[in-house]
Amino acid sequence: MFELSGKTALVTGATGGLGQAIARTLHAQGASIAISGTRAEVLQRLAEELGERVHCLPCDLSKPEEVQALVPAAEAALGSLDILVNNAGVTRDRLFLRMKDDDWQSVLDINLTAGFRLARAALKGMMKRRVGRIISITSVIGTTGNAGQGNYAASKAGLAAMSKSLAAEVGSRGITVNCVAPGFIVSPMTDALNDAQKERVLTSIPAGRFGAGGDVAACVAFLASDEASYVTGQTLHVNGGMAMI
Amino acid sequence: MSDVADRVKKIVVEHLGVEPDKVVDNANFIDDLGADSLDTVELVMAFEEEFGVEIPDDAAETIVTVGDAVRFLEKNKKS
Ligand SMILES: NC(=O)c1ccc[n+]([C@@H]2O[C@H](COP(=O)([O-])OP(=O)(O)OC[C@H]3O[C@@H](n4cnc5c(N)ncnc54)[C@H](OP(=O)(O)O)[C@@H]3O)[C@@H](O)[C@H]2O)c1
């Protein structure tokens, strides 16, 4: 099940915690992958560790001309592109009254607009070949909202609504468009919490633990697989029950 | 029929899965050949590839029949 041999995937934000887990899982399922991020040396290290079927494509998603070149570069490296994972994302948390236009715009540019441009570029080849998977990593915050994250929440809700609209457009062409919405995932940020803070957060998570990158990556692998061909326009929430939607 | 018309017809038949004899000069892609709006976008992409041209959005909007496509491509084709 969820076999991806012979398939090709582009994962953005593959230098980050979740992106590395997603890249590893898709690769382990047999996919050939192109990994992207701004830190070329981190990509290189991951590629060396994984061995064959990995291509490094450094790209700064805040630069439109680099975004435009990424999908063609992935298609050139992989032959064609079956699976796009929009995973790169940033936060610029500010209380609303203090939020500068630039705090808003830079988060929207990277989290939402880059995702739109990559999806549009990837669609051309997918439409022709009548197969495709576009998977965006959103967040529980995109559904619940969160104080101090107006920009981030808007970007993630935007991705979810964009995905539903696109799913409606291209459903007849064998292309599915979905989101995976993580809750609290172990990361340098969660590591920095003290025990009392951790305890408080954990009381709101029925599963009784923070999520791991692998929990999210498994959902991405499922949505990328042939078995998920009848799942489209959906958000798969991976949050240990902290929000039941 | 011109060479361009033959190539256009072939693309339309393949893409929309319609009978070749329905693909006549005044056949409207949507009303007569059963295309939806996404099909028309895909047809334009296929014409661009076949004829090595870029068809801007405002020109694409004027291509509603087989004949429109043939005339546009005869005027603008590169290959
Ligand atoms: N961790 C969580 O608890 C959690 C929860 C909900 C949702 N998420 C979402 O999951 C995704 C991954 O998060 P993470 O926890 O793995 O965060 P992370 O470790 O901070 O990784 C973020 C990734 O985004 C990339 N990125 C940031 N700015 C970029 C730019 N301008 N151009 C290209 N790439 C850029 C980074 O690449 P470089 O470092 O190479 O620039 C990095 O690979 C994000 O979309 C995030 O919103 C995470």
Image (tube, coloured by chain):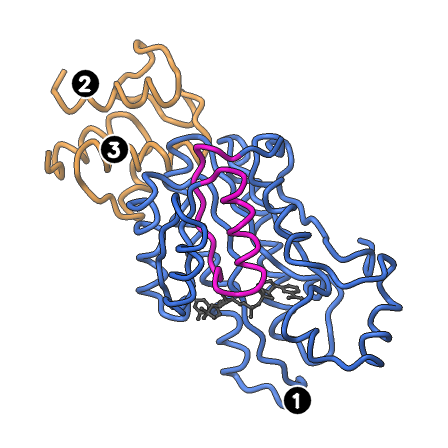
**Vertical comparison of A100 with A105: above or below:** below
Which chain did the renderer colour orange?
A: B
Colour assignment, chain A:
blue
The three-letter code of the residue at mark 2 reads Asp
Q: Image point 31% across, 64% down: which residue?
A: A65
Q: Position of residue B38 (x, y in %)?
A: 44, 36
Answer yes or no: are tags 2 and 3 on the same subunit: yes
Mark 3 neighbour class, 10 Å CA radius: few under 14, some 14 to 19, many 20 or more: many
Q: Which residue is mark 2?
A: B6
Tag 3 and tag 1, C-beta contact below 8 Å:
no
Q: Quadrant of residue A67?
A: bottom left
Q: Is residue A220 magenta?
A: no
Mark number displayed over residue B47:
3
Q: Which residues are magenta?
A: A4-31
Q: Is residue A17 magenta?
A: yes
Q: Earlier in the sequence, mark 2 or mark 3?
A: 2
Residue at mark 3 to residue at mark 1: CA–CA distance: 51 Å
CA gap, disc 2 and disc 1: 63 Å
Q: Residues within 10 Å of mark 2 (few under 14, many from 20)?
A: few
Residue A20: image location, x then y, percent: 53, 58
Residue A70: mark in rendering: none
Q: In percent of the image, x 32 and y 64: which residue is there?
A: A66
Label 1 element class: helix
Check disc 3 and report its element: helix, strand or loop: helix
Give the letter of the chain under mark 2: B
Q: Which residue is mark 1?
A: A97
Neighbours of disc 1 within 10 Å: few (<14), some (14-19), many (20+): few
Asked if the residue at label 2 sits under 8 Å from ligand 1, the reply is: no
Q: Is residue A97 left or right of residue A106?
A: right
Is label 2 in a helix, a strand or a loop? Answer: helix
